[in-house]
Amino acid sequence: MKEVAQQLELSTQGVVAEVPRGLSLASTAQLPSVSSLKKTVQRVRNELRGAPANPRNLIELVLPENYKRTTDGELFLLFDSGPEEQRILLFSTQRNLSFMEQCDHWYADGTFKSAPPLFSQIHIYNSWSAVQ
């Protein structure tokens, strides 16, 4: 069941329904309750997709591959200055950069309040293009 649970295209209910197929009636009777099976599937998937542990400093920060790309698979981490205390990370997509390149105006905001704990500041850029 744990191997089937790793197939993310199946729903939790789909995995639970798949497990008894091919088992004898006696084996099926020995299975845990449906709610226990669902919890097992969800636990396996959380381990598979779970967020990495919070690092203590920027040197320990390691971004897994799935955090470097958008859900469409487009590269999202465009720059990482590397594991050092004064680390800089640049998140965007090439498509967004191309859009900004064509815009007449860029608006930037730097804030200290909403920066994640390991970072001192975060900058956000928006762009606007006049319609001709």
Image (cartoon, rainbow, N blue to C red):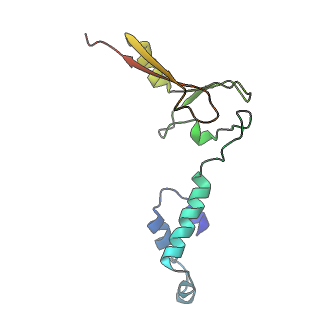
Picture coordinates of residue 40, whole percent (x, y): 57, 69
Q: Against 35, is 30 above or below?
A: below
Picture coordinates of residue 104, whole percent (x, y): 37, 9
Q: Quadrant of residue 90?
A: top right
Residue 11 placement, left or right of 68: left
Query: Viewer-proximal residue, 116 or 90?
Result: 116
Q: Against 11, is 118 above or below?
A: above
Q: Is residue 98 visible?
A: yes
Q: Tell which residue pokes out farthest to the front in this image.
A: 113
Q: Tell which residue pokes out farthest to the left in this image.
A: 132
Query: Going 48% across and 77% down the picture, which residue do you hit?
Result: 34
Q: Quadrant of residue 81?
A: top right
Query: Going 50% across and 37% down the picture, which residue do you hit?
Result: 70
Query: Viewer-proximal residue, 47 or 6?
Result: 47
- Tell me the quarter of the image containing the N terminus: bottom right
Residue 89 placement, left or right of 72: right
